[in-house]
Image (cartoon, rainbow, N blue to C red):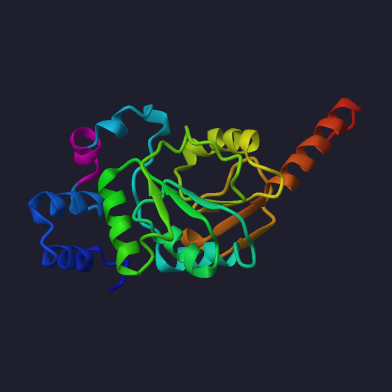
Amino acid sequence: MDQDDPGEAMAELQERHLGGLGILEVAAGTGLFAYTFWAGFLMPGFRRVPLKLQVPYVPSSRQQVENVLSLLRDRSGKMVDLGSGDGRIVLAAYRQGLYPVVGYELNPWLLRLSRFYAWRAGCARKVSYQKEDLWKVNLADCKNITVFLAPSVLPLLETKLLAELPNEARVVSGRFPLPNWEPIATVGEGLDKVWAYDIGLIRQNMEMRETTFLQGTPV
């Protein structure tokens, strides 16, 4: 089954007799219902997130996933996807050899779909999808972070990542770059473009700029 086609997932779930409520949940999670409907009525947890921190669900394309993984190749340590949607990046990261891998997602319908995909791939006990607000989870033990978030929240995300991540961590952002950071690498073009940032280098560059400023030399 192609994970880019939620319609196939719906058909298989129906064959497995999830019942009307289960199908409704997956339909909502895969975008078959309008975003405004599930955000306003189906998901009370989402409504508790401040408006400026809300991010709509847009599934990553196959090319975007491949580009993300290319920037995480040969890396180790815990990997998390912030706002993991239908879980495709988490599952692909595990298949590439990263472990442990965790997806944080507030939408319960998307969590159900993520776990279905993991179960179908034989990875149900090897990957983790958790119903958590990405703004409240502690990232201190994470070495690899992936994000596909709206530009409006990225400055706030920079602050959180700098406060919590270890120096050896790498952040990969899809669709939009982190606005105040210099990437160490980019892959792809247009909407498929992804950017990689190493936290240690980000901190080092910030310290150098601060030192230069204090010395009175223009940056």
Q: Say above or below: 127 vs 162.
A: below
| Whole-percent x, y for residue 82 in the image | 46, 46
Q: Is residue 41 magenta?
A: yes
Mark yes or no: residue 188 visible: no
Closest to the observer, 218 or 155: 155
Write the residue at 60% across / 62% down.
72
| Whole-percent x, y for residue 10 in the image | 18, 62
Mark yes or no: residue 16 visible: yes
| Whole-percent x, y for residue 152 in the image | 47, 37
Specify whether 8 is left or right of 144. Answer: left
Closest to the observer, 163 or 39: 163
Location of the C terminus by quadrant is: top right
The answer to which image quadrant residue 63 occupies is bottom left
Write the residue at 32% across / 67% down.
3
Specify whether 69 is left or right of 92. Answer: right
Closest to the observer, 146 or 217: 146
Task: Check the image and name the residue furthest to the front.
Answer: 125
| Whole-percent x, y for residue 151 in the image | 48, 42
Q: Say above or below: 5 vs 109.
A: below
Specify whether 11 is left or right of 121. Answer: left
Magenta highlight range:
34-42
